[in-house]
Amino acid sequence: MCWSATADLAAGAGIAAVGVACLVRLRRVSDLPLAALPLLLGIHQIIESAVWRTGGGTGPATTAWAVVALPLLAVWVPLGVLLAAPPAARRRLLIPAAAGLATAAALAYGLADRPATAEIRGHTVGYLLALPYAPPLVAGYLAATVGALLLGGDPLLRLLGGLVGAGAVICASLWRLEFLSTWCAFAAVAALLMFGWVGRNRAAGWADAA
């Protein structure tokens, strides 16, 4: 999990390959954003391998990593769940979708005003983000990402939400200064569940759970 440039590159390539397999198995266009999530997270890990190789700092790799990790995922996950969900579940999913849009707007503004900085700390990468009102932004981010997965009603997505939520607690406890890096790596591995989600009879699963 993020222990070196090579580890990030290898993990990212493997997860991205699973993401491509998810897209190949795709049957419903509305499932496309969620099916592409492992591909996005795999690419994200590959970007972090470039952060390692450049020694951190505020370069293009760091900026790209922060943009994906923060505003992009805050929007991508809740809107992806909303698009894939059955009609009965969509009303409650408007809450995490709205939280994601608001949080992403604030995060994008913060990154534009104060560029992210990466620091290599032993076998992890720490990202320094001088964002105002950090606690509300973290709460909004988790409500958007983890909340959408938990509220969507689908059993596999609910399991993914539980794993990612638990991962957030573990990573924040063990790697406080490197929380973002380690949590995103955990989320990327957890997103491998999407391969099973794409491959099963989704219509029946969503209908039963909703």
Image (tube, rainbow, N blue to C red):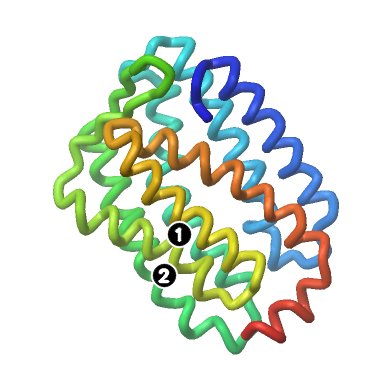
Query: Label 2 neighbourhood size at 10 Å, few (<14), some (14-19), many (20+)?
Result: many
Please provide percent x and percent y for residue 78. Answer: 49, 64
Place residue 112 in its image quadrant: top left
Q: Earlier in the sequence, mark 1 or mark 2?
A: 2
Q: Position of residue 156 (x, y in %)?
A: 66, 65
**Which residue is found at the position 45% from the left and 19% from the top?**
51
Q: Secondary structure at mark 2?
A: helix
Across and down, in percent, residue 161 comes to 52, 61
Instruction: Please report contact status of discs 1 and 2: CB closer than 8 Å, yes or no.
Output: yes
Considering only vertical position in the picture, is 30 above or below 57? below
- Tell me the residue that label 2 is attached to: 96
Image mark for residue 145: 1
Which residue type does callout 2 highlight?
Pro
Q: Is residue 52 left or right of residue 155?
A: left
Q: Is residue 65 above or below residue 92?
A: above
Mark 1: which amino acid?
Thr
x and y percentages locating residue 174 in the rendered image: 34, 37
